Image (cartoon, rainbow, N blue to C red):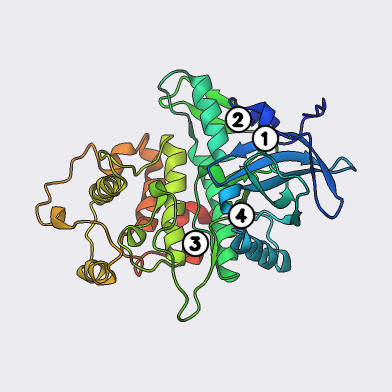
Amino acid sequence: MQHNDQMSPGYSYEPPVFDRSTIPESLQLQTGETYSVRGLFGRGGFSTVFRVRDQSGQQYAAKVLALMYNNSSDPELQAYQKIAQNPHTNLLSLHSFGKLKIPPRGCSDEVIITEACGPSIGDVMIKASMNAGYGKMATFSISDIRQVGRQVGEALVHLEQLKIYHLDIKPDNVAFTSNVTYALDTNLTPPVITLNDLKIKLIDYGNSMSHWAPGTARPMLAQPQTSRAPEVFMGIPLDEKSDVWSMGCLIGTMYIGKPIFTHQSGASQNEKQQSQFEFMVRRMNATIPEDMIEMAKQGRRCQLKFDFLKNREETNNQDSLMSLIREECDLQFFQFLKYVLIFDPTQRPSFEEVLHHEFLSNV
């Protein structure tokens, strides 16, 4: 692996544990373009994102899909092409796409080269939580959440105008544009992060899809489970309102330091989904419209059981959304969460309406 004493964005947030022997010295495209590899932005089950430089010294991110997902980049490239025709400051842009002469071990030959960003919200939260000490979950101030939320909302309004569903909104997919530094107030409970720069980009369009045309097949499952909308759990066709729910989950996570919805029990995937769905209902004290339940049953995609709704006990205050509030002055933020985290997608606001909510409109 090549080394350089000038750090690129994201360097100080490089994953702490990974096998450096799997990182190539360079990535060479079949067209002859060569990028020196300087480290890793991140690695997941579907892809690896390298920190690279071109021959002029310009920094980029190079995403290479895992070998088993070869030829799976079409939806992502379609999203980048639409964004290139109508760019937005809060959306990641494509630099180039091509085939590698020699793919890294376990990777396909397709590579997507994009502009480089700094760490993600998830990266910052993990590092700050480690700095805070065992068992402490670092969070963000209401002021910083408001500024980040406004930018995420504007990015998603733009995607909606381009007729793109993102479908993967989570802390790991909102990246700061610079290699940010932060202060951490450990005297507060929980510890609160204050960043030196709040400019962000919404990244990773690997799960994105174009808005449906009549007769187009729709996915059976989408979105990370912790930010998955109720209609997706229920097997009901998703739409742009599903991304609105995920945005609410994202900024809720920034406030409490962990997902606001998660499974409480279960060994199998179906059991975990059932557990989380029931927890979502309890946390939001939600009423699910009968027509949504009927749609779920008729669609034959839903694995959930709804018997628990007939014998619901009085909401446990410990599970309620309002049990998470830190200060009375945070009430407006919780009113915003209640505004976007509505179970019925037909009653959930659009992204245009989200941006007009008092919590985001005064940024």
- Whether the residues at callouts 3 and 2 have beta carbons within 8 Å, the answer is no
Which residue is pictured at 59% across the width and 56% down the height? 205
The residue that disc 1 covers is 40
Provide residue 298's location: percent of width, then percent of height: 24, 72
Q: Nearer the viewer, mark 1 or mark 4?
A: 4
Which residue extends farthest left?
Answer: 311
Q: Which residue is mark 4?
A: 70
Vertical placement of residue 144 versus 235, above or below: above
- From this view, report whether residue 247 is shown above or below residue 301: above
Q: Amino acid at mark 3?
A: His
Q: Which residue is mark 2?
A: 15
**Contact (Cβ within 8 Å) of mark 2 with mark 4:** no
234 left or right of 92 in image: left
Which disc number belongs to residue 356?
A: 3
Q: Residue at x 20, y 68 (%)?
A: 290
Spot occupied by residue 105 in the image (x, y as percentages of width and height): 66, 39
Residue 280 numbered tag: none
Answer yes or no: do the residues labelled 3 and 4 have beta carbons within 8 Å? no
Q: Image height check: is 12 above or below 160?
A: above
**In front: 330, or 167?**
167
Residue 321 horizontal/vertical position (percent): 30, 44
Of callouts 3 and 4, the N-terminal one: 4
Look at 41% across and 47% down and name the residue there.
333
Nearest-to-viewer mark from 1 and 3: 1
The type of residue carrying mark 1 is Leu
The residue nearer to you, when weighing 114 against 334, is: 114
State the SS at label 3: loop
The image quadrant that residue 315 belongs to is top left
Q: Amino acid at mark 2?
A: Pro
| Cα–Cα gap, marks 3 and 4 | 41 Å
